[in-house]
Amino acid sequence: MNLSIPAILQNYIDGCFSDPLSGNFLQNVNPATGAKSEMVPNSNKKDVQAAVTAAEDAQEAWANSSAQERFTILNKIAGNIEANLDVLALAETNDNGKPLWLSKKVDIRRAADNFRFFATAAMHFSADSHVNLQAINYTVRKPVGIVGCISPWNLPIYLFTWKIAPALAAGNCVIAKPSEVTPVTAYLLSKICEESGLPAGVLNILHGDGPSCGAAIVAHPAIKAISFTGSTRAGKEIASVAAPMFKKLSLELGGKNPNIIFEDCNWELMMAETVRASFSNQGQICLCGSRILVQESVAEKFLKEFVEKTKALTVGDPLQDNQQGAIVSKMHFDKIVNAIAKAKEEGGTILCGGEVIKPTGRCENGNFISPCIITGLGPDACTNTDEIFGPVVTVQTFKTKEEAIQLANAVSYGLSATIFTQNISTANFVADKVEAGIVWINTWLNRDLRTPFGGVKDSGVGREGGWEAMKFFTEAKNICISQQP
């Protein structure tokens, strides 16, 4: 299989590649170099309608296909992703700005894992039955129908496949939109799906921005469920449209996650995981521990070592052996720079980083910021309450576990939390009280695809992963048979 990237990307509708019906395109840009790259379709409601028509034609046959048939195709897609790891990883890095080693190690492998995991889920997803003296009840789960999957730019193919794979495994046809900022691996995935024998119309991939394409997907009456990952602002807009139409909704939104460090922690483990949780993917992961809460008794020691290790992180060309790459776009770069300036206005102290980096050579016009540590701000400061989504962390101190919990819960978000302690009672107490959908103890971003994923409060509604995803993309129907003579 020979994957190549054309100068002009196309939509994938009904098993065919086509230009947007409006003829409108967007300009893609390499964030590490500032150079223009591909032209990207800016699809609108006419393209969405074409995709829905294709999905409607394909839905009955796909819903009635056997679990074995769906397993075979999805598993083949997983294999073809793995076979094209190098091409996909380079495309992801050029599109997103993340280091090439990270794209290879995490993003592309996880995309293959997503398809393989849910391919097997299709084989094991089963009905429930309940028997009593009066009747036998059995509950079957039917595909929702046509579903919309909208994914973000920070983990492009990783999160795109995290939505598409379970939707297909459950027997739905999909209208999917990747971020217009990072469209290339989604385009390549459409090539892989074509080569892997996925029937025409089962997966339709549309490119475009939120107002033109995303909004049309959300508003289309034939699309019965929406799975969205992105900002809380966009999630509110989607809910305002989809909820009155009684669509199923899964919204994985923002985070401002606490990383809670107790004095009795395994110090070496904690420090390594804290650096990783703070700055992985340039801090552009919704699960990053952007608010570090450290027990007062070890705060001085922590800050000294944390600053040293942060300063040692190399920032530069993502195709070279650097630990930090480019910020995904000029717009987001400006947002992060402004957030750091706001932290200074609020009285924060910049212990290190926050500087615009200009690498020599091909990346001299790229979007690079050195990892930034900020202290001296209270829990009500904007820097501690607003999601920055970049290589910026704040550090606050606490004395007791009760104070740590109060600080951890002092934001409107509730996606994840990380706790470092060797006291199992402390770990359990804090994990129970912290307001988050996911809690890691003495680890970070340690994912098992079988577990439910999602947040509380402004971090969204619903859960993805494992059976939660399969249940979201199906509707339960209970059938009751009397046992009375």
Image: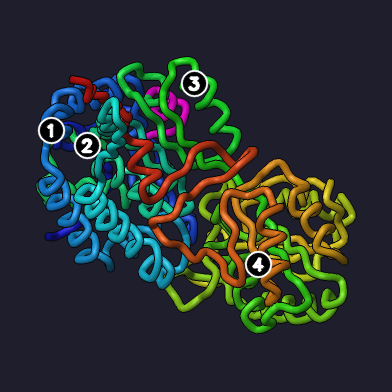
Q: Is residue 23 visible?
A: yes
User: Which quarter of the rendering shows the C terminus?
Assistant: top left
Callout in the foreground (3, 1): 1
Residue 168 vs residue 468, the one in the foreground: 468
Majority SS type along the magenta span: helix
Q: Which residue, given by chain and number where applicable, does mark 4 sit on?
A: 370
Q: CA distance from mark 3 to mark 4?
A: 41 Å
Decide: few, some or many residues near mark 2? Use Cα within 10 Å; few <14, some 14-19, many ≥20.
many
Left or right of 13: which side holds 349? right
Segment colored magenta? 207-216
Q: Which residue, given by chain and number where applicable, does mark 3 sit on?
A: 243
Q: Which residue, given by chain and number where applicable, does mark 1 sit on?
A: 64
Image x and y of residue 443, in percent: 57, 70
Name which quarter of the figure residue 166 lies in: top left
On whether residue 63 falls in the magenta region, the answer is: no
- For the point 60% across and 73% down, the residue is 273
Callout in the foreground (2, 4): 2
Secondary-structure class at tag 1: loop
Left or right of 81: which side holds 97? right
Image x and y of residue 197, in percent: 10, 47
Secondary-structure class at tag 2: loop
Do tag 1 and tag 4 residues touch (Cβ < 8 Å)? no
Q: Is residue 35 visible?
A: no
Mark 3 is on which residue type? Ala
Q: CA distance from mark 1 to mark 2?
A: 8 Å
Decide: few, some or many residues near mark 4? Use Cα within 10 Å; few <14, some 14-19, many ≥20.
many
Do tag 1 and tag 2 residues touch (Cβ < 8 Å)? yes
On whether residue 212 falls in the magenta region, the answer is: yes
Callout in the foreground (3, 4): 3
In the image, residue 34 sits, relative to residue 426, either above or below, namely above
Q: Which residue, given by chain and number where applicable, does mark 2 sit on?
A: 171
